[in-house]
Image (cartoon, rainbow, N blue to C red):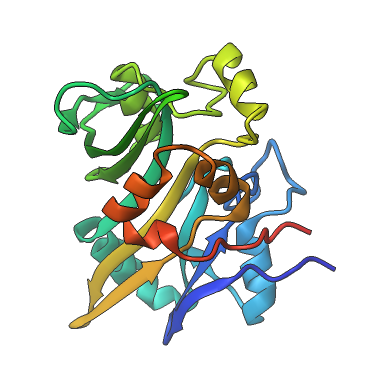
Amino acid sequence: MTRALPVLLQGDGFIAVAKPSGMLVHRNRFNPRADAALQRVRDQVGGMVYPIHRLDGATSGCLLFATDRALAGPLSAALSAGEKRYVALVRGAARGPRSVVVDRALRDDNGIEKSAVTALHAVAVCEDPPCSVVLAQPQTGRYHQVRRHLRGLSHPIIGDRAHGDSHINRAWRARGVGRLALHCLSITLSLAGETLDIRCPLPADLATPMAALPLWAEACAAIPDLSGPPLSSARP
């Protein structure tokens, strides 16, 4: 029997859970029998659920579902107008301005360029090993947007098999980072006059190796949410 995903926030018509790295949001034709978050949450609540946004399979963190189909549209619109915060451990010590807004269009699966905007803040920097903790706030929701924008700045996310460096990733696996070092830390949105503030602690598989780095204290001072106890794995 599979374990329930940790519930971050639940209310009338919605539920937010912590998705672990390595789990799809929903099954697809390439993975028709995958252990997916949609099926897990459906079983937890005992009814249909509707994903409001997507997280890459390798990304962990806040995942929001509607439990009332009529609320799916309003929740989606509220999320588009709200704020999503991601934390990433990236290759290299960030130099120059600590904050930058990347406004660079990205091609979708059909080769069509679409606008993509991400605010990036290097909150902690380390020279040895060369790495940085980055707070990313995407303003749009394109495929692999945060990952591709960081790669474009020559700071790919550690553990990124699609947009990173296999040699660098191998070295970081020896340091305990055996997954994509990207986590959706929080979602804030306004729905029917109420503010929903959804927060997800770092999971242990990311918090433990990051806490061993010299930049950890600086990162926690800049993002206090990082300093709490890690979330245990939700995998079977």
Q: Which residue is drawn at 35% across and 35% down?
A: 146
**Residue drawn at 26 percent across, 68 percent down:** 189
Instruction: State the residue at coordinates (41%, 27%).
Output: 131
Up-down relation of residue 195 to residue 35 (above or below)? below
Residue 218 can be seen in this image: yes
Q: Which quarter of the picture shows residue 53? A: bottom left
Give the number of callouts: 0
Vertical relation: 211 (above or below) 52: above
Residue 59 rendering spot, x and y as whole percentages: 52, 44
- Name the image quarter holding the N terminus: bottom right
- At a point 28% along the width and 25% down the height, the residue shown is 94
Q: In this view, does 183 lie to the left or right of 191?
A: right
Q: How far from the left and from the top, in percent, is residue 163?
A: 47, 20
Q: Image check: 7 left or right of 107?
A: right
233, above or below 100, in the image? below
Judge by depth and name the residue closer to the eye, 25 or 17.
Answer: 17
Farthest-out residue, bottom: 12
Picture quadrant of residue 169: top right
Q: Position of residue 73 (x, y in %)?
A: 32, 67
96 to 4, vertically: above or below = above
Q: Is residue 107 visible?
A: no
- Which quarter of the image is occupied by the C terminus? bottom right
Quadrant in the rendering for residue 127: top left
Nearest the viewer among 29 and 209 is 209
Asked whether, in this view, residue 229 is left or right of residue 76, the answer is right
Percent x, y of residue 201 = 48, 62
